[in-house]
Image: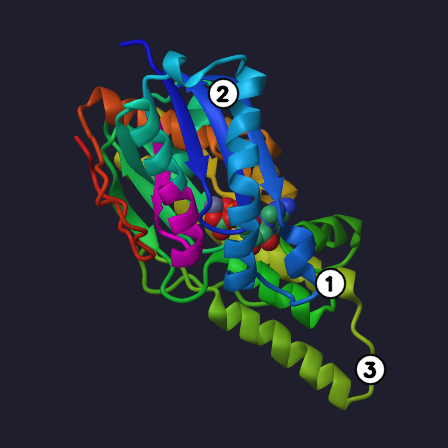
Amino acid sequence: METYILAIETSCDETAAAVIKNGTDIISNVVSSQIDSHKRFGGVVPEIASRHHVEQITIVIEEALAKANMTPNDLTAVAVTEGPGLVGALLIGINAAKAFAFAHGLPIVGTHHIAGHIYANNLVQPMEFPLLALVVSGGHTEIVLMKEHGHFELIGETRDDAAGEAYDKVARVLNLPYPGGPHIDRLAHEADEAVKFPRIWLEEGSYDFSFSGLKSAVINYKHNMDQRGEEIIPAHVAKGFQDSVVEVLTAKTLRAAREFGVKQVIAAGGVSANKGLRTSLEETFAQEGIPFYVPPLHLCTDNAAMIGAAAHYMFVAGVRGNMAMNGRPGMELKTWV
Ligand code: KG4
Ligand code: ZN
């Protein structure tokens, strides 16, 4: 079935709209970032995020259609991130999607944000099943097994902080700007030495993660150095922290890929933009002989193209939302087939 889906994403701090053909082709992809407005607060302020979304959403949708050189009549459906995310932020996108769908007589599809991150890969090369996805973002750290389109099985998840959250918190300890992930990544690559931090493996065989202990180890290290009147070397701390995160993420993903005999491993979410992690996963799976893919950077962080990719497969499977759709901040990643 041929589809042209207008997709909308407003779950956090990017206001985004895209037109996607058949779940694989990006016709247009517009992202308006608010990061600068949140920087001075050291994190996303929900009220400010909502206000920005209100100001930007119509502009972004119009731009996505204009860039695609399309009118609403050319569209098959409207897709929008239903959750998880900030409820006030989600609602702006959802209400815009409902209004657009109602005005133009189009069906609406409510999409899971993490399904979107995973499906960003489908915009680069076709997903092949069974597939293992390592999802690492500001709010999520999960290993997901997919046996077919729309099938999601949670193999492991974080028990406390998400990987991106840990990056952002450690960055704050090092006085780096928000969001801290890219800064730690850059510093880690400049370092010739690493402070030794623990690897948190949890009980044997577990695919779960824990990053709060590592974060505390960094904080304690800085505290001890301060008390001794010694200066920390931020690059060495950044490398020590990143080495620990990357080693654990890579090892658990590899073990899961072997156990489930997958045909493909993919990485998704904002932290998959991390150079250290990309290199480690690429090398590991090249050696293992399992194809590994990660989208280009602009498709790793929040965007609407990924939502349109996931929504195509939902639409084809007959999934439809309705005008009662609400923002679902704690929405779970559920199988739709
Ligand atoms: O997926 P995303 O854009 O938003 C969420 O859905 O959460 O992920 C944002 C997270 C932030 O925590 C940010 O610090 C992190 O992704 N991030 C990175 C890098 N680029 C973005 N973390 C580590 N290394 C990077 N290069
Ligand atoms: Zn995201």
Q: CB atoms at circles 1 and 2 under 8 Å apart? A: no
> Picture coordinates of residue 149 (x, y %)?
26, 26
Does 204 appear in magenta? no
Q: In which quarter of the image is residue 130?
A: top left
Outermost top residue: 2
**Residue at image x 26%, y 26%?**
107
Q: How crowded is mark 2: few (under 14 residues within 10 Å), some or many (20 or more)?
A: some
Label 1, label 2: how far apart the Cα atoms are: 32 Å
**Residue at image x 42%, y 53%?**
140
Stretch in magenta: 78-95
Q: For residue 176, which numbered disc appears in the image?
A: 1
Label 2, label 3: how far apart the Cα atoms are: 47 Å
Horizontal side, residue 243 vs residue 108: left or right: right
Q: Name the residue under label 3.
A: 230
Q: In which quarter of the image is residue 323?
A: top left
Q: Residues within 10 Å of mark 3 (few under 14, many from 20)?
A: few
Of residues 59 and 195, the one drawn nearer to the viewer in this rendering: 59
Q: For residue 124, which numbered disc appears in the image?
A: 2
Outermost bottom residue: 227
> Picture coordinates of residue 274 (x, y %)?
61, 44
**Residue at image x 71%, y 53%?**
183
Q: In which quarter of the image is the N terminus?
A: top left
Identity, as a three-letter code, of the amino acid under mark 3: Glu
**Does any portion of residue 73 appear in the rendered image?**
yes
Does 87 appear in magenta? yes
